[in-house]
Image (cartoon, rainbow, N blue to C red):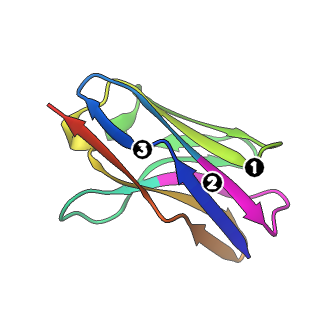
Amino acid sequence: QVQLVESGGGLVQAGGSLRLSCTASGSIWGFDAMGWYRQGPGKLRELVARITGGGSTNYADSVKGRFTISVDNYKNTVYLQMDSLKPEDTAVYYCNYERFPGKYWGQGTQVTVSS
């Protein structure tokens, strides 16, 4: 089993920054991918950013150039640096951990961007 604990959400004004953290614990020995997803009010959950065990990254078009995903393998922690935040970034952000055949989710952290 894998447990994911997220932190770093909060309320920020448009144009501001936040950094989300997600630490994995439990049966950890490497990963296939870790990432961040979000679900805004009345919307489906969508991919925000993802990083593979080999270090490849991909981002949603809406966040490219503003968000950066990174991972600290020693701390089993994935980060999402969010800059130039917009009101449309308001959502619950979920951490995701993938190691075949399992896929695990954190409990979510609220990010609210005021205009």
Q: Are marks 2 and 3 in contact (CB under 8 Å)?
A: no
- Say which label, 1 or 2, has the lower sequence index: 2
Q: In screen coordinates, is 58 left or right of 27?
A: left
Task: Give the magenta range.
Answer: 22-36
Q: Amino acid at mark 3?
A: Gly
Residue at 75%, 49% in the rendered image: 76
The image shows residue 74, relative to residue 3, as above or below, that is above
Question: Which residue has dot 1 on it?
Answer: 76
Neighbour tally class for label 3: few under 14, some 14-19, many 20 plus, Cα within 10 Å: some
Question: Which residue has dot 3 on it?
Answer: 9
Q: Is residue 32 visible?
A: no
- Say which label, 3 or 1, has the lower sequence index: 3
Relative image position of residue 59 (x, y in whole percent): 46, 41
Q: Determine which of the numbered discs, if any, sits on residue 112 in the image.
A: none
Rounded to the nearest whole Å, what is the CA distance between mark 3 and mark 1? 19 Å
Q: Amino acid at mark 1?
A: Asn
Q: Are marks 3 and 1 in contact (CB under 8 Å)?
A: no
Q: Name which quarter of the figure residue 63 lies in.
A: top left
Q: Is residue 65 visible?
A: yes
Q: Nearer the viewer, residue 112 or 32?
A: 112
Rounded to the nearest whole Å, what is the CA distance between mark 2 and mark 3? 18 Å
Residue at 48%, 41% in the rendered image: 8
**Disc 3 versus disc 1: nearer the observer:** 3
Relative image position of residue 29 (x, y in whole percent): 85, 61
Q: Determine which of the numbered discs, if any, sits on residue 34 in the image.
A: 2
Q: Nearer the viewer, residue 2 or 35?
A: 2
Q: Is residue 71 magenta?
A: no
